Image (cartoon, grey):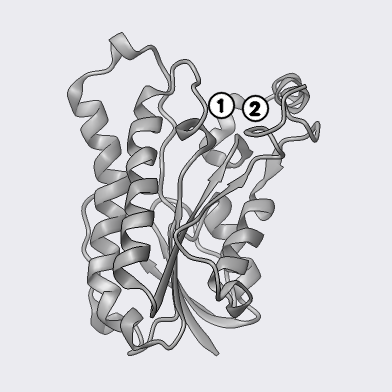
Amino acid sequence: MKNYVVIGGSSGIGASLVKLLNDEANVFASFNTNPKENFKNVNYFKYDALNDTLNSDDFPEVIDGLVYCPGSINLKPFHRFKAEHFIDDFKLNVVGATTVIQQLLPKLKVSPSASIVLFSTIAVQQGFVFHSQVSASKGAIEGLTRALSAEFSPTIRVNAIAPSLTNTPLASRMLNTEDKINKQSELNPLKKVGEAKDIAQMAQFLLSDKSSWITGQIMHLDGGFSVIKK
């Protein structure tokens, strides 16, 4: 079986992905404040993306896939942000992902078909009010995805997923009532809000050999929101 590492594997999209991968791979999933679940092929380890470093000795010699899930959704008017707010988001989203990739890169290079999956947001390509902070850090993730896909080819593929608002704990304050969910659903061409499993299934695909000719791409999983106007 392949060996996959999922950073942020105990909540939201990461937890859904770990559940999908459990039957097909050995999974090494990090948790921080959220409880870990009990799966036969999942090895959980404590990890804080802002403060901890990985010990490469804790992982197998070959890593076939790495997914970096941590993120944040901090929404408020631009004039209320301070420089340190942008820096904090950049540390979590970009520096956190970069650090993990650097630490596990030697083991990814050993795999004959390694894949890295990162996460962006629809807000990078669409202008939304109050989204300056998240758009800035996730925009950097999209640039990092394209740069690393070039640098790591042909041995390691690198792609990112850019969802619209998805029903996860991270987005709970925007989807914590039926009325909010219905309003968000009406804005979407498919008239529904995406679920964690919808995004996790794309991550699973990008890790697999079924996506062996895909790299450097930003996959827009948004119910058509970014391209369809009604």
Quarter containing the N terminus: bottom right
Task: Tell me which amino acid carries mark 1.
Answer: Arg
Task: Find numbered disc 2 in the image and state the secondary structure of the residue it sits on.
Answer: loop
Mark 1 surroundings within 10 Å by alpha-carbon count, few (fewer than 14), some (14 through 19), many (20 or more):
few
Task: Find numbered disc 1 in the image and state the secondary structure of the residue it sits on.
Answer: helix
Apparent side of residue 144 relative to residue 53 in the rendered image (left or right): right
Disc 1: which residue:
173
Quarter containing the C terminus: top right
Apparent side of residue 177 relative to residue 212 in the rendered image (left or right): right
Give coordinates of residue 143: x percent, y percent.
34, 47
Q: CA distance from mark 2 to mark 1?
A: 5 Å
Measuring 53% from the left and 57% from the top, which residue is drawn there? 14
180, 161: nearer the viewer: 161
229, 78: nearer the viewer: 229
Examine the rendered structure and indicate whether residue 68 appears above or below residue 132.
below
83, 217: nearer the viewer: 217
- In the picture, residue 79 is in which quadrant? top left
Measuring 56% from the left and 26% from the top, which residue is drawn there? 173
- Contact (Cβ within 8 Å) of mark 2 with mark 1: yes
Give coordinates of residue 37: x percent, y percent.
56, 65
Give coordinates of residue 91: x percent, y percent.
24, 44
Give coordinates of residue 71: x percent, y percent.
41, 44
Task: Tell me which amino acid carries mark 2.
Answer: Asn
Measuring 24% from the left and 50% from the top, which residue is drawn there? 95
Measuring 19% from the left and 23% from the top, which residue is drawn there? 83
Examine the rendered structure and indicate whether residue 115 appears above or below residue 12.
below
Disc 2: which residue:
176
The answer to whether residue 202 is seen in the rendering is yes
